[in-house]
Structures are given as C-alpha cells and as structure tokens.
Image: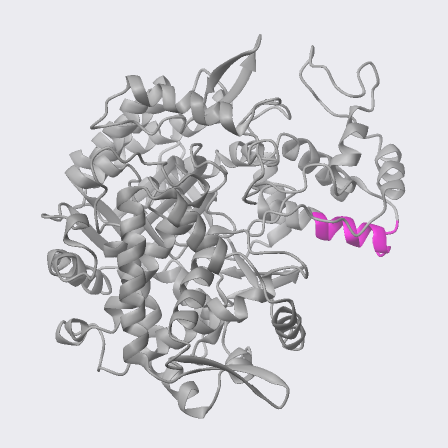
C-alpha cells in the first residue's frame, strides 16, 4: 500500500490466525478443497434472510457490479493473463484424454492457482508459478482440442500470420526468465522494467514514470491533489507518454459499462439519499474518468454512515504497482453487524484521546480527528482484488486530504474473521511453535478478542492517525510507502492494545489479555511467516515486510535486556517474551520513528529501516520453519468461495426474493464467472 493509500490490512491469511483457540463445532462447512499452498474456505452471510426485499435487492445488484470487474484485474496484473486463463479453461473443459495423467493434474493445479491469483503470479509473493506439466504435453493437448484464440484483428503477435497465436504464450508460462515477478521491490532495480504488471506499456522506465507524475503534481492543486495515475495505463505513443484512461468509453469500457449498468439498477433500492448520491457520483466517475469526480465520490462515501448496507467498487488499492500510482480494481458489498459494531464505535468515539496520547512527536498529531467512523460488517460478496484472497479489515478513502478534511470509514469484516477462526480449529500450529503451556493458555483465552481488537485499532485509528507536514507529497517514500504505512497502523494497534484505556472502555477483559497479541505478532514476524517464502528468497510482500521490520527491530533493540529471546529446545527454535512492558515501550519508540518518517517523507530512513529489518531471511531458521510446518499439513494461504445469489422474479420480471446458496464448488464458480462475467477481449 502506497503512503497515500492507507487502506487494506491483508491479515486474512496470516499464520497468526492459525494460532487461534479451538472453537465450538458448527454445522456450516467452512473448509473446502486444498491445492498447491492454498485452502479454500466458505463464509456465512448470517442475517441475510432477515433483510427486507429492498435491501436484498440492493445487495444483489451491488454484488453483480462486484463481479463484472473480474477481467479488469486479470488484465491489470499481466498482459497475458486473460489469454492464458481462456486457453487453460478450454483445455480443462474440452480435454478428452487421460485426466489422471500427471500432466493433466499438473495443468489443473496450475489453472486453479491462476484463478486464485487472478493471473500467473503468486497472489502474495508475486513470483511466477512454475508449471508441473510439460511444455510438449501442453502444445500437443491444445492441438488435439483444436484450440484457437479470438484476438483483435490488426494486432502484431509473435506468431503473426499463423493460426496458432497461442504458441507465443508458451515461454510466458514455462520460461522462468520471462516476467518472473509481478511486482518487483528489489532495491536498486528499475521497478517498472522488472515488474510484470500491466499498468505500464513496454519500454517505459521507472524514472520516466516518476517524472511524468511529478510534472502532473506541479500543475495540480497542491492542497487537494487528486490521486494521479490511479485509473489509467501509462503507455508510449510515437515516443510520447500518454494515459489510457479506464472509463466506460475508454480502456476496459465493456467491463465498466456492465458495472455501471448494475449500479444504475441498484439506485431504486437505496436506503437513503446519501447512498443514492454515492452511487450516482461513482457512475459519473466511471463515465468521465476525471479523478476530481473520484474525489467527489469518495467524500460522499465517507459521509454516508446511516445505511445498513455499504460497498466499495473501483480502482482502489495500489499494492500491485511497484511505485504506488495505479489502482487495482475491486468490488465488495456488505451490511452492518449491529451487535458487534458497538466495539468499533467505542474506538471511533474516543479517537481524539488516542491521537492526543500517542507517543509520536506533537508536530505529527492531528489537532482534530474528523469524521472517523467504524463498524463490524458481514461481507456478502467479494470481487476483483478482494477475491478469492481478501482482507479482514478495510480503511478508506486513501486520499490524505480527504481523510484530513472529511475523515474515513473503517470496517472489520466479522464473518470472514469468524470463518478463518473456525477453519483454524485443531491445526496443531500452536502446539508446534508456541513456547509452553502458559503461553498456550493465554492465547486460547484471549487470542480471538485481541486479534479482532488489533484489527480494529489498525484500521479505525492507526491509518487515520497522524498528519503529514506541509509540502510532503503522498508518494515521497516511493516503493517503501506501502510497507511503512502498514507498519505504522500495526504499531499503533500494538502500542494501544496494551493500554489501560482499553480495559476502562470494556474492550479488553483485563491487563493481561494484550500479551496474547504481542506473542503471536512477534512469533509471526520473527519466525512463522517464513513458511510463505521459497528457500533462497527474500521477503518481498509489503505486509510481510512490515511485520518483519517491526518484530526484528524490537528484537534487536531489546536484545541487551533480553526483552524477547529466541532459544533452542530439543533442536527446535522457540520464542519467549521476558518483559511485555518493555516490549510495549519499544513498540512506542518505533511508532514515533515510523510516524516521523511518514510525516517528513524521509525516504532514506524508510529505505534503511525496511532493508535492514524487513527484507533479509535467516536461511537456517527458514529451513527449520519449512520443515516443521510441512509436518502439520496446513495450507499457508486461504481464500473464499463466494455465496451464490439468485434473484427470484415474477412473470413481469420483478424481483420477489433473493436466495443465497453456499453449495457451489470452486472450479464451477470460477468457470461460471469466466462464462457469465467475461467482459473484455483477450487483449486490451
């Protein structure tokens, strides 16, 4: 997440969630199939049947709008993704040969990974998948089914003049040197030339991109800047840089028109005028592509807090862009969990107290916290960058000036958190890595409460805290902005979860509960998140880097006093926290420094902090973690199969009910989405 884009905390599949206490049995089947390093889950939409017909219909159309942008994300994450998906789906559904062969099974796993990651690169680590089927088999199989692509006429392809244009995809799939990383963050590289994302056309350098948007900023509104480059592909035309805007009449127009249509269909069913204003402003933005219209939509969205139902839809997060300009498309619909929202409302009502008592320099504190609202929600549908792998907390909008003048909205996604908790039951993770029965008891008793509370603090207050000094641009930290911002929000949550104020507010049961969060966070940052990394690799993903730099900085700066220890027992490495109070002090010091870095736009300090503590991996400890984890047979990544919503209509075509079902399989859902929601040509 770029420094100006302060939103999603992707904790949804962190190993910390596998350190949960056992939960009571539930008749609903939360877990589903496993493949590669992934396990599929399901989530309940509790309370949907109790909604009014009008509310159900609103959710139905918002859900449809959330699904029609799927092709956009595939194309954004790699220029060949749609072609490869189409090709492999044809083979998967049309192959008449031996489906028990190693090649076909390997191709099936590869396709499932492409579906899950919305492309050929890992959804989290960003490295390209290595196929477990042969190049020769794929070519032979495609010829046997007579596969042909439907590509736009007039385009120049590597196989120009030949009917088998798909053969140019073979090196993209099999050659490890071709497009190896979707998002490369390696210090010293040209991050644009070495990243496979499709936000920038061929032949464009990192320096050119940075200069292009610096020049836009110079002539823009200094005090209320738009989010430059958010909704466009930057390409060269006759040697000159130009933006292909993502609008209903521009690039991705066929998909955006479908999204617009369903947003328009939703308008008669809104709960209030504020919701109507939000949707109308979003429709206008999709039509014009004007980023000032996007700001108008964002302001209206922040101000609308009365409705039970809410949604996000559009080009939002910038994790997929190594420089943090381009927004990946996402869609999401939800409704408020009234009972559990009391927790987040308590935090938002006390936002000024937390800001005033923060350990950061007074120069970086907000004099007045405006418009901070928070709630716990039930997700109804996940789309785009939020599907199948998603977040458990969201804080929007990402524009700093809008947050300053109008505030922000934060959500904790309660039914997804519940699904993760249920799925983690009996994994054996705690028993393998936690250092003893007393710590295990602590985590079992308070882990769920404190994990949810840390997410609330991160989203509701962490991202909304602090301020940037005048003249500091939103993207001053460049490639390190996302990591620093996520670290800032995590540290805010870690510092305050141990505060007596939370006991006073009734959010934690006692002064000991916070220790469960401290232990699982440090264990994850120092040790267990390493199981997501391939041997020999460094840490690349922004959220993993932020957890690593926090944990390693605290470990190193508390080493003299043995605040946190790593020790050996029976040939295994364990972690022990000897002084929780001192650890909190360390978190406070690091929070103060990270806020200073952000507020002052200190790129050199950001680079030093992340590169020193958040990137490198101890190879010996890494090997040990992988070996111990492998014995547990746990998938390190998890994602969701969406519920299926069916509109029941009368003879006149009016919706009389909306039914929800949880029975659709993963492959059926993915194939159905490719059939019913494919809106773009294979090349764009």
In the image, residue 661 above or below residue 285: below
Along the viewing direction, whichever of 617 and 427 lies nearer the viewer? 617
Residue at image location 48% in from the left, 57% down from the top: 612
Question: Residue 164, percent across and down?
Answer: 82, 24
In this rendering, is residue 684 above or below 306?
above
The percent coordinates of residue 306 (x first, y second) are 16, 46
Residue located 86% across and 55% down the image: 101
- Which image quarter holds the C terminus? top right
Using the image, determine if residue 159 lies above or below residue 633.
above
Front position in the image: 189 or 624:
189
Determine if residue 24 is in view.
no
The image quadrant that residue 266 belongs to is: top left
> Which residue sits at x=27%, y=23%?
292
Magenta residues, dominant SS class: helix
One can see residue 566 in this view = yes
Does residue 281 appear to the left or right of 99 in the view shown?
Answer: left
Q: Is residue 430 magenta?
A: no
Image side of residue 209 versus residue 153, left or right: left
Rendering coords of residue 138 (x, y %)? 84, 41
Q: Which residues are magenta?
A: 98-110
**Drawn side of residue 22 relative to residue 298, left or right:** right
């Amino acid at each position: 997440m770029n420094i100006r884009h302060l939103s999603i905390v992707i904790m949804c599949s962190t190993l910390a969630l596998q350190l949960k206490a056992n939960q009571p049995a539930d008749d609903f089947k939360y877990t589903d199939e496993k493949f590669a390093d992934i396990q599929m889950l399901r989530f309940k939409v509790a309370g949907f049947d109790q909604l009014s017909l009008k509310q159900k219909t609103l959710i139905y159309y918002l859900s449809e709008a959330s699904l029609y942008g799927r092709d956009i994300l595939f194309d954004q994450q790699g220029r060949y993704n749609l072609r490869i998906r189409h090709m492999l789906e044809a083979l998967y559904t049309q192959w008449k040969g031996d489906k028990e062969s190693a090649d076909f099974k390997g191709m099936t796993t590869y396709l499932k990974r492409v579906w899950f990651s919305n492309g050929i690169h890992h959804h989290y680590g960003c490295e390209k998948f290595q196929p477990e089927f042969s190049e020769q088999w794929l070519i032979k199989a495609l010829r046997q089914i007579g596969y042909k692509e439907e590509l736009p006429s007039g385009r120049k392809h590597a196989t120009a003049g030949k009917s088998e244009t798909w053969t140019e995809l073979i090196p993209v799939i099999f050659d490890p040197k071709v497009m190896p990383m979707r998002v490369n963050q390696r210090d010293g590289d040209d991050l644009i030339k070495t990243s496979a994302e499709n936000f920038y056309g061929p032949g464009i350098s990192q320096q050119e991109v940075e200069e292009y948007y610096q020049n836009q900023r110079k002539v823009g509104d200094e005090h209320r800047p738009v989010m430059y480059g958010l909704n466009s592909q930057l390409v060269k035309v006759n040697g000159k840089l130009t933006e292909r805007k993502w609008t209903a009449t521009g690039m991705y127009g066929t998909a955006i028109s479908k999204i617009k249509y369903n947003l328009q269909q939703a308008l008669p069913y809104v709960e209030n005028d504020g919701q109507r204003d939000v949707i109308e402003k979003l429709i206008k933005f999709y039509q014009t592509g004007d980023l000032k219209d996007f700001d108008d939509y964002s302001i209206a969205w922040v101000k609308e807090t009365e409705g039970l139902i809410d949604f996000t839809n559009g080009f939002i997060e910038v994790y997929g862009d190594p420089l943090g300009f381009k927004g990946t498309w996402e869609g999401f619909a939800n409704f408020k969990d009234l009972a559990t929202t009391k927790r987040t409302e308590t935090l938002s009502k006390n936002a000024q107290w937390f800001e005033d008592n923060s350990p950061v320099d007074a120069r970086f504190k907000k004099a007045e916290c405006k418009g901070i609202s928070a709630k716990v929600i039930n997700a109804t549908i996940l789309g785009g960058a939020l599907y199948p792998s998603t977040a458990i907390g969201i804080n929007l909008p990402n524009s700093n000036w809008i947050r300053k003048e109008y505030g922000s909205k934060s959500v904790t996604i309660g039914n997804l958190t519940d699904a993760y908790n249920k799925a983690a039951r009996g994994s054996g993770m705690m028993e393998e890595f936690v250092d003893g029965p007393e710590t295990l008891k602590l985590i079992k008793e308070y882990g769920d409460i404190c994990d949810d509370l840390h997410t609330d603090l991160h989203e509701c207050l962490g991202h909304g805290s602090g301020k940037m000094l005048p003249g500091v641009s939103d993207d001053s930290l460049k490639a390190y902005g996302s990591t620093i911002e996520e670290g800032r929000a995590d540290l805010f949550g870690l510092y305050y979860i141990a505060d007596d104020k939370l006991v006073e507010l009734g959010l934690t049961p006692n002064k000991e509960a916070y220790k469960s969060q401290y232990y699982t966070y440090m264990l994850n940052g120092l040790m267990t998140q390493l199981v997501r990394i391939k041997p020999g690799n460094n840490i690349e993903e922004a959220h993993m880097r932020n957890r690593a730099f926090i944990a390693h900085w605290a470990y190193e700066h508390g080493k003299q006093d043995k605040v946190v220890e790593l020790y050996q027992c029976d040939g295994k490495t364990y972690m022990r926290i000897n002084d929780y109070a001192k650890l909190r002090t360390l978190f406070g010091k690091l929070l103060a420094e990270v806020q200073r870095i952000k507020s002052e736009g200190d790129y050199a300090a950001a680079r030093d902090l992340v590169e020193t503590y958040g990137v490198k991996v101890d190879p010996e400890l890494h090997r040990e973690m992988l070996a111990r984890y492998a014995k547990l047979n746990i998938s390190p990544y998890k994602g969701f199969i969406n519920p299926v919503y069916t509109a029941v209509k009368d003879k006149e075509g009016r919706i009389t009910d909306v039914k929800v079902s949880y029975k659709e399989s993963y492959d059926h859902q993915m194939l159905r989405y490719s059939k019913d929601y494919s809106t773009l040509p294979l090349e764009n």
